Amino acid sequence: QVQLVESGGGLVQAGTSLRLSCLASGPTFSSYYMGWFCQAPGKERELVAFIGWSGGATYYADSVKGRFTISRDNAKNSVYLQMNSLKPEDTAVYYCADRVRNSGSRFNPSGYQYWGQGTQVTVSS
């Protein structure tokens, strides 16, 4: 059973940065993709970014392109989300997710089999 633990969230002002971390434990960290999703109050969980096992394949939602960077360190069983130029509309709970089976769409939450507990990011204007 893979366990994911996020950290790095907090309350920040618009225009500043945060770096989220996700530490995986359990079976070998050899997922197809690792993703970051966010969920704001009253909204559905949506994909922010994902990264392939080798780090060569990445995807970003249009809303974060040019501001956020996803990376992973397989030796440390970790994936990161560097969030720059934060905006109030980035406020949400951010979840780390692990796609260990190539089942379903990697663009949807249903395509990921393991989830962290989430970390709150609040951006004030």
Image: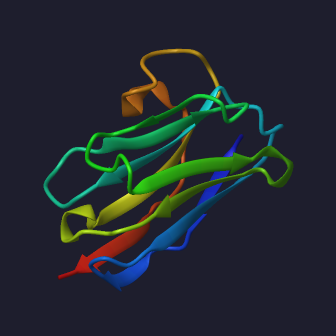
Question: How many numbered markers are drawn?
Answer: 0
Identify which residue, 32 or 112, lies in the foreground.
32
Q: Specify the quadrant that holds the N terminus.
A: top right
Q: Residue furthest top?
A: 103
Expressed as whole percent of the image width and height from the top left, the position of residue 80 reads 60, 56
Q: How is the image coloured?
A: rainbow
Front residue of 53/45: it is 53
Which quadrant of the figure has residue 104?
A: top left
Q: Considering only vertical position in the picture, is 33 above or below 46?
A: above
Residue displayed at 44% across by 42% down: 49
Residue 118 in the image, given as x and y percentages of width and height: 45, 61
Relative side of 122 to 33, left or right: left
What residue is at 18 percent from the left and 61 percent from the top?
41
Residue 106's x, y, as percent?
Answer: 46, 25
Please identify the quadrant where the C terminus is shown. Answer: bottom left
Q: Is residue 24 left or right of residue 8?
A: right
Q: Is residue 18 above or below residue 116?
A: below
Tell which residue pokes out farthest to the left in this image.
42
Counting from the top left corner in percent of width and height, residue 119 is at 45, 67
Image position of 88 with respect to 45: above or below = below
Query: Quadrant location of residue 109?
Result: top left
At 77% from the left edge and 32% from the top edge, which residue is drawn?
30
Q: Residue at x 67, y 36 (%)?
A: 55
Q: Is residue 8 above or below residue 79?
A: below
